[in-house]
Image (spheres, rainbow, N blue to C red):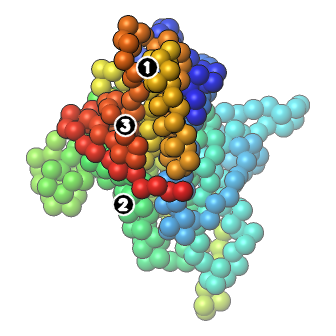
Amino acid sequence: MRQSTLFVKTSKNLPKDEISESARLLLRAGFADKLMAGVYTLLPLGFKVFKKIEQIIREEMESIGGQEIFMPALQPKENWEKTGRWQSLDILFRLSAGESREIALGPTHEEIVTPLAGRFIKSYRDLPFAVFHIQNKFRNEKRAKSGLLRGREFVMKDLYSFHADQADLDGYYEKAKLSYRRIFSRCGLGDCTYLTYASGGSFSKYSHEFQTVSPAGEDLIYLCPKCSVAVNKEIIADVKHSCPQCGQKDLIEEKAIEVGNIFQLGSKFSTAFGLKFSNEQGENRPVLMGCYGIGLQRLLATVIETHHDQKGMIWPAAIAPAAVHLLALNLENEDAKKSAEKLYRDLRTARIEVLFDDRIGLSAAKNSQKPICSACLAGSWPARALWPRASWRSRKDRTIKQTFWRRRI
Ligand code: ATP
Ligand code: MG
């Protein structure tokens, strides 16, 4: 991709009410645009990062047998009345659709997926299975001040699993925990994201959040340094300020961002919708369910909160908008232009994603007579690029590293 053709420019003018650091960096770099509080457009480079995160999540959901579907955002009021949440859910957007009809803008999809599953589950032979979708959610959040960390419209991956008995649900729940760990590590959050015990509501002892330690977090967690798990604020009194795994009392309080949440719903929604199956003895039993969510923009913004410096965002390689940022700083010089264009061509031929800054008149080298052409890998400072090899300096630990590309032609 040539930067000279991007319709978006970097910007110094930020909306005055934007106080979230990740949102400020995204807006400044032209990765996102703010429409109103809690509502953002993803621009070409931001959307590239988003799609990489989406693909990582999709791969991990498929690896635990999730089947991808796409459910609607417009949802009938009747479904929400069945669970009592039409009245009780404060963040629900309720729309009037003509004189006598009201509908909900989906904040989550239990009310849709449960009756959907009911159309296909008759006996124990139809279980277990899991479905997921990656789709827009709408929540009328009261405090939409955290940029993309808390949107009023945002994309969520939500997976729902259906089981005949508790042992099967437990087994799947553990697999889902591992797949969540893989997602957060692949996105560069492995070191700072903790499995966190949270309230399980009335149907299971605990649910689990995945909390990334960050000063930008709106949540407080209590970390057990020995077990590398945490407890959230909601239940810290219930567990008597001790680690639920080892009992240790010296827990460390940290601010954190909830990047994911997994929950055993048990029979809560199947009871509301009469979702039953007949077991081997021919008796009708309620289906047991689990639900597993991740907010994509929140995950993207969390990566920035934990990976930036005074010069801007530092993308982990797996989700960077491109593998290489090629900078031709002195395009007025014929040699620089030629070598940059050749490097750009070679990288593309080898199918290595490259963002080519081919804008004429870049100030850094204006006064230099020397041809300058350098490349910058994700998470690095610009360095010497001698295709198919580059040496670069890590922005995190400042060490010099080398990359050799294998030609993938
Ligand atoms: P919070 O406590 O932060 O309001 P929640 O517990 O209500 O979130 P869940 O219903 O558990 O959220 O949603 C599952 C996941 O969706 C969360 O773990 C988070 O990653 C993401 N998420 C929830 N609300 C938002 C939001 N307003 N903007 C972006 N992502 C969100
Ligand atoms: Mg939650």
> Percent x, y for residue 176?
44, 63
Q: In this view, does 188 lie to the left or right of 91?
A: left
First in residue order: circle 3 vs circle 2: 2
The one nearer the camera, 271 or 23, is 23
Badges 2 and 1: C-beta atoms under 8 Å apart? no
Does any atom of ligand 1 lie closer than 8 Å to the CB of label 1?
Answer: no
Circles 3, 2 touching at the beta carbon (< 8 Å) = no
Distance from label 1 to label 3 (Cα)? Answer: 14 Å
Q: Residue 395 vs residue 21: left or right?
A: left
Q: Is mark 2 within 8 Å of ligand 2?
A: no
The residue at the point 48 percent across, 30 percent down is: 340
**Quarter of the figure that contains the C terminus:** bottom right
Q: Can you give x and y, in whole percent of width and height, for residue 118 in the image? A: 71, 68
Mark 2 vs mark 1, foreground winner is 1
* SS at circle 1: loop
- Whichever of labels 1 and 3 marks the residue nearer the N terminus, that label is 1
Report helix, strand or loop for mark 3.
strand
Across and down, in percent, residue 155 comes to 58, 41
Instruction: Note whether residue 219 is visible.
Output: no
Which residue is labeled 1 in the image? 329
| Front of the two marks 3 and 2 | 3
Provide the residue designation for mark 2: 205
State which quarter of the image contains the N terminus. top right
Q: How crowded is mark 2: few (under 14 residues within 10 Å), some or many (20 or more)?
A: few
**Residue corresponding to mark 3:** 385
Mark 1 is surrounded, within 10 Å at the Cα level, by few (under 14), some (14 to 19) or many (20 or more) other residues, namely many
